[in-house]
Each structure stands twice: as structure tokens, then as C-alpha cells.
Image (cartoon, rainbow, N blue to C red):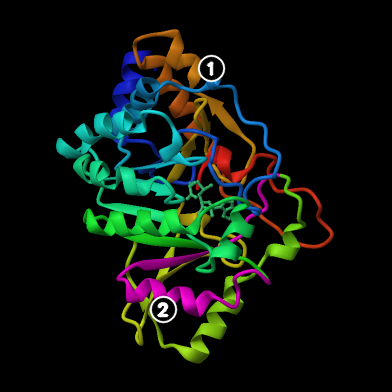
Amino acid sequence: MDGANRSYRIRQVGLIDPFGRAISYLRVSVTDRCDFRCVYCMAEDMTFLPKRDLLTLEELDRVCSVFVDRGVRKLRITGGEPLVRRDIMTLFRSLSRHLANGALDELTVTTNGSQLARHAAELVDCGVCRVNVSLDTLDPDKFRAITRWGDIGKVMAGIDAAQAAGLKVKINTVALKGVNEDEIEALIEWAHGRGLGLTLIEVMPLGEIETHRADQFLPLSAVRARLMERYTLEDSPERTGGPARYVRIKETGGLLGFITPLTHNFCESCNRVRLTCTGKLYMCLGQEDAADLRTPLRLSESNEGLERAIEDAIARKPKGHDFVIDRRRAQPAVGRHMSVTGG
Ligand code: SAM
């Protein structure tokens, strides 16, 4: 098939992987840097990428726009901490044109909330309707211990500002054995009391950290069983385009999500790929294989080479991850930290 016919064919069928899954969701890590150092996410002493290796905001826009052209309907901006990247609102602003013309259903962001107070109103102005804020505890001292130097007051101010600006806020909480496992009910009551959804996430074995993953891992199957002793959990058809599965808690009226990469693998319905800030495309969060999009991006002003590189990458999207956390295994499933590929 010659080049012209090939790209015509792709435009017709969108991006479909070898297992018949349509790729409709792109997560974009715009920086590997973060103003927190969560103990399960990063090592204390991280080496960050030199700024010259990063795609510019214009380049990020170009790659995202090619994906939108190819049928991606949802973009999530993440990191590192996306809101610490200089001029990041320029990217939101430019991507918002795809919302305005109907090519994109949703532009959203995952943030630690520390910078949300100053960006919330502008995010709304750029068409962002929903944000995910990561928060693992309500206790200021525990918060500082988990994040190594975060200030919970700033996060709470960010959540207040987001709600005041009209953003729908979902809280993401990584369930950590012996750290916040006694706080899950309090987090549910707090979040639902404020009209926020809450999603619990199992810790994943990504990157070397100081602690053995088995010491952090809290299976959500056990948390769910415990919650059922206190609450009525009703399965909900709610879907947000990602891996979370939801229940409504009858007593609070709020939604509780579960992201269970370890106890219940959700790869069969995976619709996602992930772009890093240096232009690497990861087809699976839990595998090492990645495609270099920066080279074709910079090689030509035409998008043809970039489109071909994306097509070739999707053609080798693996069936799923092989996450295992047990005492005998010291190595992480993949060498990179979550901050590289984004949450
Ligand atoms: N800085 C932003 C934030 O805090 O949401 C975006 C990036 S952060 C890497 C995205 C999400 O990944 C956060 O909810 C974080 O708690 C979660 N996360 C980080 N490392 C993880 C791990 N090893 N397993 C499970 N979740 C992890």
C-alpha cells in the first residue's frame, strides 16, 4: 500500500490495536517534575530530565492534535505535576479548539492540587469540566510524610477553588497498607459530604523506591469487603473513559471508584496510550516498550512520518501488563516511575 492510501485507510478506521481495541484516550505527561515526592511514586533523590529534552508546548499540541485527528476523543494532561510546567495554560488554551469544534469529548487534568487555586478559573475557560486531584490522607502530618514536603492546606485551597469555579472534582487516593488504610471511610465521608467522587487505586510496582512494594500494597478486594460491612455498595454503570469501576454508596449518595490493576486486571478494555514529555509513546503503563515520536515530529513539518510512527506503535500495543507484587520479587514491573508516564 503506498503512503497516501495507507494514511487514507487509517483515517477511515481510526487507531485499532491488534486485539481490536479502539484507541480513544491519550494521556500526556507534560513534565516529569513535581513539587511533591510521594513515597510510593518517586525516590527521594530523583534525577529529572534536562529541560532541552522536553517537547515544546507547540510540539505537544501537534502530537495531541494528530491523535485527535485519528479518533482520540479524550485527552488527559498529567505529569509529574502538570500545573508546575511553565506556561502550561497555553497548551490547554490551544487544545481547547478541539473541544470547540466537537473533535474532542473531553480535556481533563490529573493534578496534586497544589497549584489549582491559581489555575482553576482558566481551566474552566479552556473548556475543562472535570479534574482529578490526588489526595491520600486528610491528616496534615501524614500528608507531609507521604508527599515528603507537601502542604495539605494548598491542596484544600485548590479543591475549594476548583469547586467554586464550577469544576467537577474527583479525588484519587492510593490505598497504602498501614498508612491510610484506617482512613478510607473518613475519606469517603469527607469527599461525598463535599459532593466529590472518590476513587481508590492499588499501588503499582513502577520504578525503584526506598520501600518494598509488598509493604505498601493494600488489595482493594479486601478494602471493598470491609466497606461492605458498613455501607451498602450498589454497582454503578458510571464510566469515565478510564479503568475505574464504580459503586454508589447508598448511605452517602456518592460514587466510589476502584482501580484494581493487581487484584482485577482491566486490560481487556484498555483504550489508552501515554505520551511522555520527551515524546515517547507508551502503549501500556506496565510494559517497557515505547515508540519515539519526537524524531518523526522534528524531522518534517508534515505529519505523515509522525502518523506512521503512531500507527506502527499501536500495531504493537500489548495485551496487558503483568503486575505482580510479592515478597520474592524485588524488581519493579517496569524501571520508570509513574511520574514519567503519568497517572
Ligand atoms: N502530580 C499529579 C498528581 O499527583 O495527580 C499527576 C501525576 S501522578 C504520577 C498521577 C497519579 O498516580 C496520582 O494519583 C498518584 O497518586 C498516582 N501514583 C503515583 N505512583 C503510583 C504507583 N506506583 N501506583 C499507583 N498509583 C501511583
Residue drawn at (59%, 64%), measured in percent from left and top? 141
Q: Quadrant of residue 257?
A: bottom left
Judging depth in this view, the residue of 80 and 68 nearest the camera is: 80
Instruction: Using the image, determine if residue 159 lies above or below residue 137.
Output: above
Q: Does the magenta stretch include residue 179?
A: yes
Q: Residue 52 carries which label?
A: 1
- Label located before the other in sequence (1 or 2): 1
Mark 2 lies within 8 Å of ligand 1 (Cβ measured): no
For the record, the magenta segment spans: 178-207
Residue 190 x/y as whole percent: 40, 74
Residue type pointed to by label 1: Arg
Residue drawn at (35%, 16%), measured in percent from left and top? 303
- Return the residue found at the far right: 328
Q: Which mark is residue 189?
A: 2
Q: Does the magenta stretch include residue 62?
A: no
Mark 1 lies within 8 Å of ligand 1 (Cβ measured): no
Residue 10 x/y as whole percent: 34, 29
Residue 232 x/y as whole percent: 41, 88
